[in-house]
Image (tube, rainbow, N blue to C red):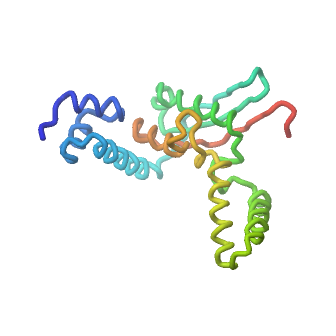
């Protein structure tokens, strides 16, 4: 199948990947647009993994105030270079993640950030619920593990469904930005304040 300039342009608009990479992906997938998108996403993720060892000491701190001054978020996101930190894509990402945090109130960035006592309390509640089902012990653990996975998906930033696009997680959104910018990006820390809440 002949790969036309229009096909390459269409793929570039959908993925924000360079023209030559789009052309190669289309050639490798026989012009199948969906397969080409998947291939480029896989390669972007591979690039992101390679960058994981790099130092991310640039970036920005951003504040977001929502709901008439009732909720506020302060967030620090890091990248490798000042150039990337000033890019529109990076700045938009930081603003979007601050807004996402205001909307969802995550307990931490990753599962390791959730306090041990919160995890233990959740596990105990889920175990008590599971025992009421009368299932055998080996099944109870699987039930609790499944509920804990759901707990993390709901309460940990990187595993949450991204509010502006629930078809992807915040981690997916981060990976897309890493693939596009070509630098390591880390959500370093955040604080969320809600009027009258502890």
Residue at left offset 63%, top offset 45%: 157
User: Which image quarter: residue 188?
Assistant: top right
Residue 174 visible somewhere in the drawing: no
Q: Position of residue 145 (x, y in %)?
A: 64, 65
Q: Is residue 73 above or below residue 178?
A: above
**Residue 46 point in image, percent of width and height:** 38, 51
Q: Is 86 displayed left or right of 119 in the figure?
A: left
Expressed as whole percent of the image width and height from the top left, the position of residue 163 reads 59, 36
What residue is rendered at 23% in x and 32% in y? Answer: 8
Please state, as top left, top right, bottom left or bottom right, where the N terminus lies in the image: top left
178 displayed left or right of 147: left
User: Which residue shows up at 57% across the image and 32% down it?
Assistant: 94
State which quarter of the image contains the C terminus.
top right
Instruction: Judge whether 35 appears above or below 85 on screen.
Output: below
Kindly indicate the quadrant of the structure image that contains residue 104: top right
Q: Position of residue 10 (x, y in %)?
A: 28, 30
* Residue 52 visible somewhere in the drawing: yes
Q: In the image shown, does 169 or 64 lie closer to the viewer? A: 169
Q: Nearer the viewer, residue 58 or 146?
A: 146
Q: Residue at x 22, y 47 (%)?
A: 29
Q: Please determine whether, in this image, residue 90 is positioned above or below residue 136.
A: above
């Amino acid at each position: 199948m002949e790969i036309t300039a229009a096909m390459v342009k269409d793929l570039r608009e959908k993925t924000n990947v360079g023209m030559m990479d789009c052309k190669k992906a289309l050639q490798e997938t026989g012009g199948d647009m969906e397969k080409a998108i998947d291939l480029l996403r896989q390669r972007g993720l591979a690039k992101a993994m390679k960058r994981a060892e790099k130092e991310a000491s640039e970036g920005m701190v951003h504040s977001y105030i929502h709901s008439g001054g009732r909720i506020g978020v302060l967030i620090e996101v890091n990248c490798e270079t000042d150039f990337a930190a000033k890019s529109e894509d990076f700045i938009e990402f930081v603003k979007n993640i601050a807004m996402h945090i205001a909307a969802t109130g995550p307990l931490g960035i990753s599962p390791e950030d959730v306090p041990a006592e919160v995890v233990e309390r959740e596990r105990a509640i889920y175990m008590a619920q599971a025992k009421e089902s009368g299932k055998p012990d080996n099944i109870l653990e699987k039930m609790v593990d499944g509920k804990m996975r759901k707990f993390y998906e709901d309460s940990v930033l990187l595993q949450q469904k991204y509010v502006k696009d629930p078809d992807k997680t915040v981690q997916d959104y981060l990976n897309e930005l890493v693939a596009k910018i070509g630098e390591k990006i880390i959500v370093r820390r955040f604080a969320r304040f809600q009027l009258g809440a502890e």
